[in-house]
């Protein structure tokens, strides 16, 4: 079976998941089975088929599993959001359609994605500009102590850092392609630690330092972890020096310790992480109410879950919210509550398969820029999943990052569709038969 035919058959489970999921919602709400679920499944399958036909025409050699995996995650996310809020689900479906359009536009515009190397400094300048937008007066939007978005009057809230992360990865891939040998050859060893020459490593430190400073001003710790983790991953791929990663992790530990003890918003998150069941923190502003209740919800799910639609999100009578931000930050807790450990593990395995395919794209890439670009994009995607799932499960402090393609968020869907398009562009070139 050819790669594109495998992709075609891989889209069938996604449409069946939409059909079965919406049927389950209708049965749970009104104890009736509606034909509307079949309609939604057919519409979703039609959209995915349109994307498949487009890929068959433009990228015939691309990885056959990345797009079906995205379809499965997006279909599951639509069902879960619809179960929580029908209005948000309709908006999410609209973002999904717009994301597919942007997905196709990215492939057409950057068919030869290597041209992005020529504009790396323009790209990084625009990315840093996008990151600072939420801190500007009038347009900036603050939520829970963090500046995460820009208000488009009368339309929606846009989150520029979602796109800035892709621009920074492109810059790093291009810059490290030119300097990776110099970083190793010109390095010095001090007390057994390899130190790259500042002449070549300095621009990376300056750009990344500016990005970190901006994220501190935004109080956006989750995105900081993603950016810094992607930097270390790409640095290791470029130089094959584990010492660079070790030094980077030590520096990150010192930096996050300072932020966690000197910035009130971040300190509150750390206290919540350490003592989520403390009565004092439970009812405090920016306290542990959300984290503690998410732990209760996950514990209630057990191995097999309470059943679809059985998670308690609101207090009886609608007198209050038991699990705040259930469709965004806490959607993984809802999944674990209703589908249990096995259901949530299935979601994590889907993400792991996506990361595996992304890393395989990086391994197959024939040039350094393509290899670094694929590795950086995949690392950024993986870290985004880790940051939000780790926060909900109390592995790390909770931060406001969306679960890719599953949680509600228009900016996240659009940016991740661009990310997938770039991975498929790299994959098509890597898997193309040699002339």
Image: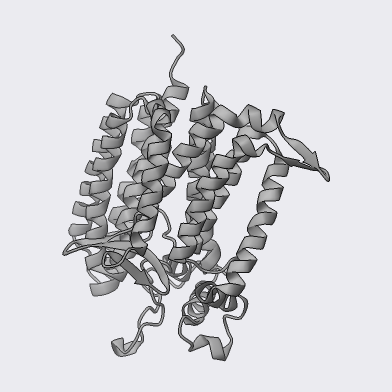
Expressed as whole percent of the image width and height from the top left, the position of residue 281 reads 54, 86
Q: Residue furthest left?
A: 154
The answer to whether one can see residue 383 in this image is no
Expressed as whole percent of the image width and height from the top left, the position of residue 68 reads 38, 41
Is 26 drawn above or below residue 281 in the view shown?
above
Query: Which of 299 and 249 lies nearest the eye of the viewer?
Result: 249
Expressed as whole percent of the image width and height from the top left, the position of residue 259 reads 58, 68
Is 105 drawn above or below residue 279 in the view shown?
above
| Quadrant assignment, res 261 | bottom right
Q: Is residue 363 left or right of residue 49?
A: right
Q: Residue furthest front?
A: 199
Query: Which of 100 and 303 lies nearest the eye of the viewer?
Result: 100
Q: Residue at x 56, y 33 (%)?
A: 176
Tally of marks: 0
Query: Which of 223 and 344 lies nearest the eye of the viewer?
Result: 223
Image quarter of the C terminus? top left
Image quarter of the N terminus? top left
| Quadrant assignment, res 408 | bottom left
| Quadrant assignment, res 243 | top right
Is 38 drawn above or below residue 366 in the view shown?
below
Q: Tell me, what colour scheme is on the image?
A: one colour
Q: Residue at x 37, y 34 (%)?
A: 7
Q: Is residue 106 left or right of residue 282?
A: left
Q: Residue furthest top?
A: 435
Q: Residue at x 29, y 86 (%)?
A: 318
Q: Is residue 155 left or right of residue 139?
A: left
The answer to whether one can see residue 33 in this image is yes
């Amino acid at each position: 079976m050819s790669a594109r035919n495998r992709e075609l058959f891989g889209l069938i489970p996604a449409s069946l998941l939409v059909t079965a999921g919406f049927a389950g919602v209708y049965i749970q709400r009104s104890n009736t089975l509606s034909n509307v679920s079949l309609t939604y499944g057919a519409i979703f399958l039609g959209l995915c088929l349109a994307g498949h036909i487009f890929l068959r025409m433009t990228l015939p050699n691309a990885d056959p599993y990345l797009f079906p995996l995205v379809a499965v995650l997006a279909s599951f996310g639509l069902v879960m959001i619809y179960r929580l809020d029908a209005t948000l689900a309709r908006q999410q479906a609209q973002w999904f359609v717009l994301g597919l359009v942007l997905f196709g536009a990215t492939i057409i515009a950057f068919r030869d994605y290597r041209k992005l190397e020529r504009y790396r400094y323009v790209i990084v300048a625009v990315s840093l500009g996008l990151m600072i937008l939420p801190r500007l007066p009038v347009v900036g939007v603050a939520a829970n102590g963090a500046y995460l978005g820009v208000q488009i009057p009368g339309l929606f809230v846009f989150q520029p850092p979602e796109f800035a992360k892709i621009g920074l990865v492109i810059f790093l891939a291009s810059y490290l392609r030119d300097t990776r040998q110099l970083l190793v050859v010109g390095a010095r060893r001090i007390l057994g630690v390899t130190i790259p020459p500042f002449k070549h490593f300095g621009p990376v430190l300056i750009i990344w330092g500016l990005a970190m400073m901006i994220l501190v001003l935004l109080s956006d710790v989750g995105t900081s972890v993603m950016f810094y983790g992607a930097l270390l991953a790409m640095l290791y791929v470029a130089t094959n020096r584990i010492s660079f990663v070790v030094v980077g992790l030590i520096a990150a530990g010192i930096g996050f310790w300072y932020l966690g003890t000197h910035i009130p918003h971040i300190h509150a998150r750390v206290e919540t992480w350490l003592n989520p069941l403390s009565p004092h923190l439970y009812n405090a502003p920016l306290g542990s109410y959300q984290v503690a209740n998410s732990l209760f919800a996950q514990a209630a799910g057990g191995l097999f879950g309470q059943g679809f639609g059985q998670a308690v999100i609101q207090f009886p009578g609608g007198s209050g919210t038991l699990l705040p931000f259930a469709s965004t930050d806490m959607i993984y807790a809802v999944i674990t509550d209703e589908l249990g450990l096995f259901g949530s593990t299935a979601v994590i395995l889907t993400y792991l398969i996506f990361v595996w395919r992304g890393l395989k794209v990086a391994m197959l890439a024939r040039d350094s820029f393509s290899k670094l670009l694929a590795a950086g994009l995949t690392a950024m995607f993986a870290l985004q999943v880790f940051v939000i799932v780790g926060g909900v499960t109390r592995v790390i402090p909770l931060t406001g990052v969306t679960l890719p393609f599953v949680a509600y968020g228009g900016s996240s869907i659009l940016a991740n569709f661009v990310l997938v398009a770039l991975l498929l562009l790299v994959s098509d070139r890597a898997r193309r038969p040699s002339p």
